[in-house]
Image (cartoon, grey):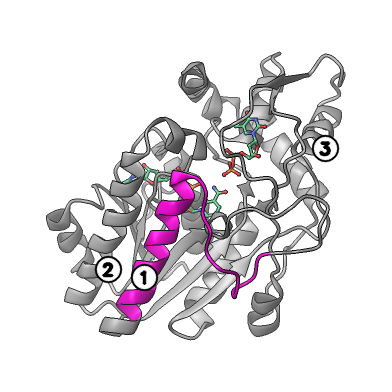
Amino acid sequence: MKILVTGGAGFIGSNFIHYWLEKHPDDEIINFDLLTYAGHLESLESIKDNPHYSFIKGDITDAKAVDEVVSKVDAIIHFAAESHVDRSILDPLIFTKTNIIGTQILLEAAKKFGIKKFHHVSTDEVFGALPLDSDTKFNEETSYNPHSPYAASKASSDHLVRAYHDTFGISVTITNCSNNFGPYQDPEKFMPRMITNLLSGQKVKVYGDGKYVRDWLHVLDHARAIEMVFLNAAQGSTYCVGGMTKDVNNLEVAQKVIKLLGKSESESIEFVTDRPGHDRRYAVDWTKINKDLGWEPQYDFDSWLEKTVKWYQENESWWKPLKEKSESIYKK
Ligand code: NAD
Ligand code: TYD
């Protein structure tokens, strides 16, 4: 099968490409990515000469370029997006352009060229926020209630994907996944920012009171969930994907990482100004994907966290050149 992966130079897309080519070495992947601040071809260095992999620099909002690449493939797995909530507060319009218009342009091309499968990679943030200390979780029936411009743009893109299925009969699937962590994540995001700050002798910056809960999932568990849905799920279906069985707040995550790195807690945490409109708690009920497709996370959170911290310790050459630039957005 020839698959177009959009946004394959980003965090999840690059991990997904490595995963896919290892599991499905006979398939062919075209990675179509604009290489924004978040796209790093260094993450794909080890496969750049693989004859089953190729890279095209291009913009999903450019219909001509999209048509050209979509005409060559059987299926699309769509990761490309503006993905950082903090950036969507600083500069929301690019989120509308990339995440909404870009997705629609891809759907148009899928329609025009009779694409067999279109998988849309989305987020649990479309559902809004849950109260702290409750047992409520997001599931496939939860109403959309996005708060940040990022979440609103992803919600719109999900609606468009479903509309193209219902109206034009495009074969689509959607995954709404929780916060990912793992190798090759841009050091702007919480988990790698925290680890690389500590590795550089700086403090973890904890927003507000730190009692914000995310449903952390390792990126390889996410890749496996996408694989299962893409290959085996009914067309038109949606799956929620998450990893946690127990809430862990940001402060507790920071404490775990500080301990793994053998640092002193009192000297390693700085509470900073909170994010406006900060969602309190995300939690995902992943019963449906477990029951229908047999998916579950491979390891527990603590084991994945330890592996992730080790990866950043051993791969300074990947993150060090990005660190200064990634910190510059926080000065704004
Ligand atoms: P990322 O920001 O690390 O990567 C995004 C990639 O898209 C980058 O390589 C970037 O260059 C590319 N891109 C941006 N605009 C583009 C455009 N106009 N045309 C072509 N390429 C473009 O994001 P990520 O964390 O890897 O997330 C990937 C997808 O997964 C996104 O759709 C995101 O909404 C979704 N998601 C992310 C998470 C998470 O925790 N990171 C969780 C659930 C869902
Ligand atoms: P982030 O990685 O930006 O993901 P999202 O906002 O999409 O969930 O942030 C994860 C959580 O960590 C969120 O509650 C905001 C918080 N956070 C910090 O406390 N400090 C930081 O330096 C960053 C980047 C995020």
Examine the residues drawn in magenta and state their main secondary structure: helix
Mark 1–mark 3 distance (CA, rounded to whole Å): 36 Å
Residue 1 at what x, y percent from top left? 36, 75
Q: Residues within 10 Å of mark 2 (few under 14, many from 20)?
A: many
> Which type of secondary structure does the marked residue at label 2 adopt?
helix
State how far apart marks 2 and 3 are (Cα). 41 Å
Q: Which residue is mark 1?
A: 161
| Residue 84 x %, y % | 49, 40
Instruction: Reply yes or no: does residue 149 show up in magenta.
Output: yes
Q: Is residue 160 left or right of residue 318?
A: left
First of labels 2, 1 by sequence position: 2
Q: Give SS at disc 3.
A: helix
Label 1 secondary element = helix
**Which numbered disc covers residue 107?**
2
> Marks 2 and 1, how far apart in space?
7 Å
Q: Amino acid at mark 1?
A: Val
Task: Give the magenta range.
Answer: 138-165
Q: How many marks?
A: 3
Look at mark 3 in the image and give the residue it sits on. Answer: 252
The residue lying toward the viewer, choosing from 141 and 98, is 141
Q: Residue 195: give its label.
A: none
Residue in front for this viewpoint, 219 or 129: 129
In the displayed structure image, the side of residue 54 where residue 303 appears, left or right:
right
Q: Name the residue rendered at 53%, 30% in the picture.
A: 318
